[in-house]
Image (cartoon, rainbow, N blue to C red):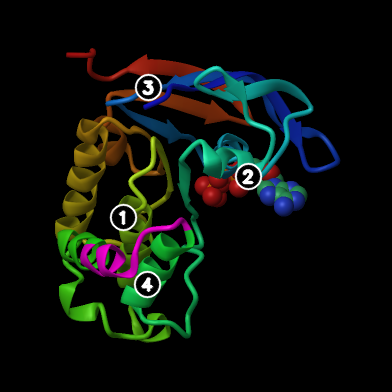
Amino acid sequence: MSVLSVDGVTLGYGGEPVLRDVSVRAEPGRLLAVTGPSGAGKTTLLHAMAGLLRPSAGEVRVGDEAVRDRDHAVSRRVVLVPQDNGLASILTAGENVQVALMAVGVRPADARAATAAALASLGLAEQAGQLVEELSGGQQQRTALARGLALAGDVLLADEVTSELDAVNRQRVLERLRAEADRGAAVVFATHDAEAAAFCDAELHLRDGRAESLAIVKSAP
Ligand SMILES: Nc1ncnc2c1ncn2[C@@H]1O[C@H](COP(=O)(O)OP(=O)(O)OP(=O)(O)O)[C@@H](O)[C@H]1O
């Protein structure tokens, strides 16, 4: 398992920087919340961590390697659950998870078993055979997270994965994120939800692309 570190990252989309000199570490076994108002730069930071966006200054490192691009981050087992869920709407929930596993070399029988377990752990056992386009927004959100969890990476980047969930499912998702950290992954969770952030071990608060504060919510065991 690897530490993901963001060191002095500045990044924009062509105009003014959207992130300015942001530094933070996501550590194995720990849950890091990234909070801040809409437009503060949470998704941009997760995309930089995932290797999708290249900083104009500073760097993102996984272990002792600077992340070059998304393929490199994937090879270092950095998993992203995107805000828009990124699911194929014409496949079933189960197929979406299984295809992702087989794409990284998991054997079909193992992929089927891991898919069933990941969906069941998020209360989606009944939905495995349903097309994504027929699922509710919250069910789609949980399917996308199930796919990310099934990939069992070293780093899990979860972007607003509770925004469409009721209280029961939100709690279930937070517990799965905790279990993922307990497995040893470094988990980064972007959220608007202060209660969900309080469940994490540390919180990076962004405002206008700057790290306004980095709070330790719970100290390491
Ligand atoms: N593809 C893009 N092209 C240009 N500007 C962008 C792009 N994506 C985001 N931005 C801008 O970057 C800033 C940060 O956006 P980002 O999506 O990272 O914020 P966020 O904190 O995740 O917001 P939200 O909570 O609403 O998802 C915003 O001003 C946004 O308009």
Residue 98: name its quadrant: bottom left
Give the labeled residue for mark 2. Answer: 70
Give the labeled residue for mark 3. Answer: 27
Q: Earlier in the sequence, mark 4 or mark 3?
A: 3
Q: Residue at x 25, y 40 (%)?
A: 180
The numbered disc on residue 150 is 1
Q: Earlier in the sequence, mark 2 or mark 4?
A: 2
Residue 58: name its quadrant: top right
In the image, is residue 130 above or below residue 37? below
Q: Earlier in the sequence, mark 3 or mark 1?
A: 3
The boundaries of the magenta stretch are 104-113
Q: 23 or 29: which is nearer to us?
A: 29
Q: Residue at x 85, y 39 (%)?
A: 15
Q: Quadrant of the N terminus?
A: top left
Q: Quadrant of the C terminus?
A: top left
Q: Residues within 10 Å of mark 3 (few under 14, many from 20)?
A: many
Q: Residue at x 81, y 34 (%)?
A: 16
Q: Is residue 156 left or right of residue 94?
A: right
Give the labeled residue for mark 4. Answer: 137
Q: Position of residue 128 (x, y in %)?
A: 25, 78
